[in-house]
Image (spheres, helix red, strand yellow):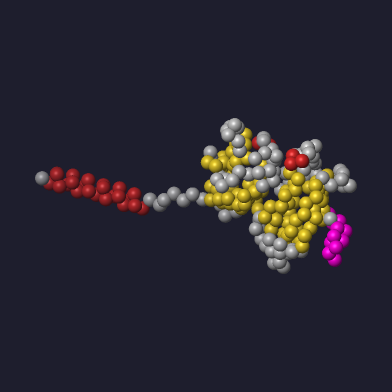
Amino acid sequence: MNIRIKAFTCIVAAACWASCKKNNDAPTVQLTTSLNVVNASNNVINFYQNGTRINNTSSYYPGGSLGYVTVKAGLQNFQVKLASPSTPNILFSKPITLDTGKVYSLYISGQTLESVFFAEDVLKADADGNALVRFVNASPDAGPLMLAFEGGSLPDHVLDTVKFSNVAYKATDVAFIKVKGGFVHNVAVYQASSPSSPKRDTTIVLNAGQIYTLVSYGTVGSNGNQGLSTRLIINQ
């Protein structure tokens, strides 16, 4: 009888210990971060993390961005596919390590792994209320690019003013500059080797207190929608 009681007591104790251990196990917390995907290619694409499509509401159109999306942090595999039922295969897969608590921009400038580059975004609004803007050259064949604000009728906007000079393809260390907000600006982008031949003029409005990225993409030797273009991306 005593042996049976001792055995029963051991079983109950083991069950209680397993139950307590199970209840004390903390749930797995998946760390996340924010990623702004910019389609700087000439194709309509979809973007995936570990095989799961990230852009569920719309595809990424050339020059387009859907803003910052929440993705898993740490070392993750990202894939790009053309947004067409006839091309279901992955164009490429790229492992990227992203830290939680930070935000990033990732640029896709073509259909190869070498066409992808990314950078951490340090977004801090200007204390004086100016707009902040940076320039990213995502054109594979344009070479170094210049970006200027064309002359206009504003007191501080009479002559063409070069804002960014000799920005290389995939350069991610270009700092934000301050620009007075609330005005319309005509933007000219041209190759550093051909300053008298702007490749694209773009009219933009920069609002006070906001943060922007101007992205040039496309190929110089192409015409129409395939040619060199410049798009304004709102970061914050």
Reply above or below: 46 against 122.
above
Q: Would residue 123 be counted in the magenta stretch?
A: no
| Left or right position of 192 against 206 | right
Residue 32 in percent (x, y) is at 53, 50
User: Which residue shows up at 73% across the image and 54% down it?
Assistant: 134
Q: Is residue 85 visible?
A: yes
Image coordinates for residue 109, horizontal then vertical, percent = 70, 41
Res. 147 in view: no
Q: Nearer the viewer, residue 225 or 73?
A: 225
Relative depth, front residue between 227 and 31: 227
Percent coordinates x, y for residue 18 in the rendering: 30, 48
Q: Quadrant of the C terminus?
A: bottom right
Residue 162 lies in the magenta-colored region: yes
* Magenta stretch in the rendered image: 151-163
Residue at point 80%, 47% (across, down):
200
Q: How many marks?
A: 0
Quarter of the picture containing the N terminus is top left
Q: Residue furthest bottom?
A: 128
Residue located 77% across and 60% down the image: 184
For residue 191, above or below residue 150: above
Magenta part, dominant SS: loop
Residue at the location (61% across, 43% down)?
A: 59
Task: Say whether residue 123 is left or right of residue 12.
Answer: right
Q: Which x, y percent locates residue 33?
A: 56, 51
